[in-house]
Image: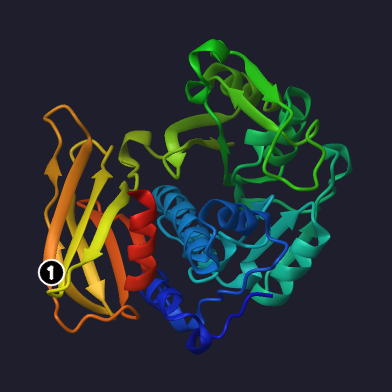
Amino acid sequence: MISNDFNQLHPPLQAFIQDQAPFPLEFNSLISEQDEMYLFALENHKIPEKARIRYYFNGRRIFDAVRQVVSWKFNSFNRLNSFLDFASGYGRFTRFLIQEIPPQKVWISDIYRDAVKFQQEQFGVNGIVSTASPAEYSVNQQFDCILACSFFSHLPEQTFTLWMQKLYHLISPEGILLFSVHDRDLLPPESKIKSDEILFIPQSESYSLDVNEYGTSYVGEEFVRQTVQNVSEGQAICERIPQGICRYQDLYIVAKSPLPDFNQLNFSHHPFGRLEQINLTAEGELHIRGWVSEINPNSQIEAILISINGELIQQVKPLPNSSADQTFSWSTQINLPSLSPEDIILIKAINTRSLEWVFEAATLEVLQAASNEIR
């Protein structure tokens, strides 16, 4: 297991959790060494502490998306009596959810028995071991909110439909099902499909699941809507949020009873960006440069916030690259003669909808090394 005691954590992890978790000292940061989402992050980012921060931050971004929908539908998490996180893995999202809703009201379900056991032991939630076949998945209750994040994005057509049917019938009369998919727009031009089609590719980031059952799928909006109508016998309400999960997968909302006015949801996306350079000169001047994008209509990047050792040092206003572009460049120079390689730097962007993008939370030494690799 990867340690959990806040005071024993690597200082950059402490800084990130202090900044991003609603209740940092109560935040369970333990990650199972079998967690495929963490292992995927580690493969991409190489440095364990950096992989952990990306892992946590993706969990936070998913939580922010779910929170917006729950607030729109139920006003708050307090109105929920039951929440099912289906295909939940080892709790990337759950660790944020239980900071808002008592774990006794949370059910998690995954095909990995060890993942279910891990979450039950660490988060105190209810656990359900899933099955490969929807017909064998037996649950004797319904839920006010069901989340199936990055699950349908891996299914072939037959099990896509069967699992949709299964989860739809597990929604309480006033409840909702949230699920994400890879939209067909993510495909390269030579692989494009029609809006009423699904394309399944037998490959995924999973190290153990059969790729013929759990690969990668892309769908058109008409295919999704028709599937929902078929499994509900034309009764379901279905809404779509393009790129609603981490500005990548589409998020769909399905309900058995009328939903509030969808226009009132006014869903907000996080900013997204990259740090391009960070360098400390011999004179003690810190040079930082990067870019950030904002896709929300009528929204702007409010500021780039730079903190060192937990203290906000500077706010930077980014400049648009062009009038038609959604990408903004930013740079700054900070005169800090006493800065040391071990100092913790946290850099983030915040938009006018109060959503954030964390560029980095790391020591100056690690950030400089990463910047040198980029160049």
Residue 234 in view, yes or no: no
Q: Residues within 10 Å of mark 1 (few under 14, many from 20)?
A: some
Residue positioned most to the front: 282
Residue at (63%, 69%) from the top-left corner? 31
In the image: residue 231, left or right of residue 307? right
- Pick whichever, 295 or 46, lies toward us: 46
Residue at (11%, 54%) from the top-left corner? 317
Label 1 element class: strand
**Type of the residue with mark 1:** Ile
Q: Position of residue 277 (x, y in %)?
A: 26, 55
- Pick whichever, 237 or 225, lies toward us: 225
Residue 93 in view, yes or no: yes
Q: Position of residue 344 (x, y in %)?
A: 33, 76
Q: Position of residue 351 (x, y in %)?
A: 23, 51
Residue at (75%, 38%) from the top-left corner? 166
Residue positioned most to the right: 136
> Looking at the image, how many numbered discs can be counted on the residues?
1
Q: Position of residue 156 (x, y in %)?
A: 73, 27
Q: Is residue 289 above or below residue 209?
A: below
In the image: residue 27, left or right of residue 135? left
Dot 1 corresponds to which residue?
Answer: 334
Quarter of the image holding residue 316? bottom left
